Amino acid sequence: MSSPPPSTGIIIFMSWNNNILPQNFYNRNPVTVAQELLGMYLVRKIGSEYLVGKIIETEAYLPKGDKAAHNFTGKTKRNASLYKTAGHVYIHAMRQYNLLDIVTEGQSRPGSVLIRALEPVEGVKIMKKFRNESRIENLTNGPGKVCQAFKVNRDLDGMDITKVTSNLFIIKNTEITTKPVTITERVGIVSEKNLPLRFTL
DNA sequence: GGTCCGATTTTC
DNA sequence: AAAATCGGACCA
């Protein structure tokens, strides 16, 4: 019952099946989850290919009282995935792009973490093709770019990313990270501008 | 069916 | 600095 490791790359992926983040990782407040996701690896399986990126920028959207969060005016068809349980994804359109959120607590506490930027690790060639872009630094340095590079579209909205069978999930970084987390304000929003909910590695 | 607008990206 | 571009929410 084990998936093949990526074609090239790092030793940490040798046992990555054991390192998929479980539901109880996500089932905490989004501020904690957003910070702890930094340094972990987003993995996307497309056919027999694996795309991997290290998470380097996230934002938290709060379950209650956050005017900038998509849950603020209640449940709609669009944001229904936020009301699932922790570890599902909420993928929504922003202009002509898609953005990827992970649901944190869910149900009556529909918070989430927006994946804003990655450092490409594995499958760079495919990312370049999906992005129609050759500069590595331009592949995944924005939330819309992340989805384009990893072929994350709204077909995946509402999927559970805590299962071994998922074609999208996040694995633990088993290396020791010493870099401190930088905390700043969220970007691209008009309300709740000044909350310290953006986290960068 | 029309209108408005945004958790963005790209280009001028 | 401004255009490109589009699905969803809302109202009619």
Image: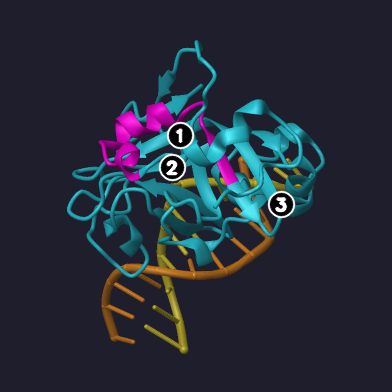
Chain colours: A cyan, B yellow, C orange
In the picture of the structure, the residue carrying the numbered disc 3 is: A49
In the picture of the structure, the residue carrying the numbered disc 2 is: A114
Which of disc 2 and disc 1 is earlier in sequence? 1
Amino acid type at mark 3: Glu
Q: Which residues are magenta?
A: A23-43
On screen, A76 above or below A95? below
Q: Is residue A34 magenta?
A: yes
Asked if badge 3 and badge 2 are on a common chain, one would say: yes
Residue A194 visible to the viewer: no
CB under 8 Å between discs 3 and 2: no
Tell me the CA gap for discs 3 and 1. 25 Å
Q: Residues within 10 Å of mark 3 (few under 14, many from 20)?
A: some
Q: Nearer the viewer, residue A38 or A187?
A: A38
Tell me the CA gap for discs 1 and 2. 6 Å
> To which quarter of the image does residue A78 belong?
bottom left
Amino acid type at mark 2: Leu
In the picture of the structure, the residue carrying the numbered disc 1 is: A58
The residue lying at 20 percent from left, 48 percent from top is A109
Residue A199 visible to the viewer: yes
CB under 8 Å between discs 1 and 2: yes
Element type at mark 2: strand
Residue A153 screen position, x and y as percent: 56, 61
A142 left or right of A49 in image? left
Residue A52 screen position, x and y as percent: 63, 40
Q: Is residue A64 magenta?
A: no
The residue lying at 31 percent from left, 31 percent from top is A31
Element type at mark 3: strand
Element type at mark 1: strand
Which of disc 2 and disc 3 is earlier in sequence? 3
Mark identifier at residue A101? none
